[in-house]
Image (spheres, grey):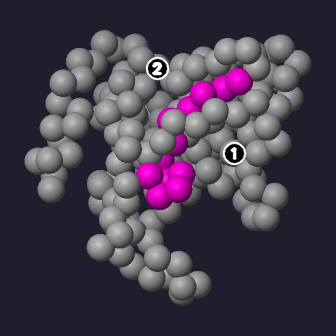
Amino acid sequence: SAAYWERTFANVTLTGDYAKDILAIAETQLGYQESTRNYHVDKEGNKLGYTRYGDWYGSPYGHWCAMFVSWCAALAGISDKVVPKHSYTPNGLYWMKDKWGRAYSRAKVEAGAYTPQPGDIIYFKSPTTKATTNHVGIVTGYSNGTVHTIEGNTSDSCRQRSYPVGYYKILDYDVV
């Protein structure tokens, strides 16, 4: 229920520091899993479970990684003029690039021209899709050539993940 999940972030005190606040909200969601009992079967036969992030967005059975990031930003008090409310990762990436021009490519990070920061939004690509990006998460840290994240809709849940900075699926980092 809405009352139940609102309690998951009720103890977060927002500081006004967007990077810290988006992470504080995202951390409260670790372990959340999409519903296995309340689901929709899409035209390809995939089971898409209900999520609170999709419900908040208006697409309760949609692919939810971008909705998770948008939800975290909104609950962190970040205006949609800073981080757009979106469900389609290419829209979020292009909006951030056009609006702020602050995206840093994986190549810049590998070359040492940028170091991923906690609170950055990280976009991933898939070699099997035509979209430039098909997944998004939030950076929690960077150390010894490894970037650490919190991601929604990774194995149908919110999880922490880690990748080598040169991981071929990393596309861009956007500063919040």
Mark 2 lies on residue? 19
Picture coordinates of residue 130 (x, y %)?
78, 64
In the rendered structure, the answer to whether residue 128 lies left or right of residue 66 reads right
Picture coordinates of residue 43 (x, y %)?
54, 86
**Three-letter code for the amino acid on which mark 1 is drawn:** Phe
* Vertical comparison of 44 with 15: above or below: below
Which residue does the image show at 17% across and 30% down from the upper left?
A: 10
Task: Report which quarter residue 54 is drawn in.
Answer: bottom left
**Three-letter code for the amino acid on which mark 2 is drawn:** Ala
Mark 1 lies on residue? 124
Which portion, as a residue range, is magenta?
A: 146-157
Which residue does the image show at 38% across and 30% down from the upper left?
A: 27
Which of 145/171 is in front?
Answer: 145
Picture coordinates of residue 15 (x, y %)?
31, 13
Q: Is residue 84 visible?
A: no
Which residue does the image show at 37% across and 54% down from the upper left?
A: 33
* Vertical comparison of 43 with 138: above or below: below
* Vertical comparison of 111 with 134: above or below: above
- Element class at badge 2: helix
Overall secondary structure of the magenta stretch? strand
> Is-magenta flag for residue 147?
yes
Which residue does the image show at 30% across and 55% down from the upper left?
A: 52
Task: Report which quarter residue 105 is drawn in.
Answer: top right
In the rendered structure, the answer to whether residue 52 lies left or right of residue 104 reads left
In the rendered structure, the answer to whether residue 125 lies left or right of residue 31 reads right
Could you tell me how far apart the alpha carbons at marks 2 and 1 are, in whole angstroms?
19 Å
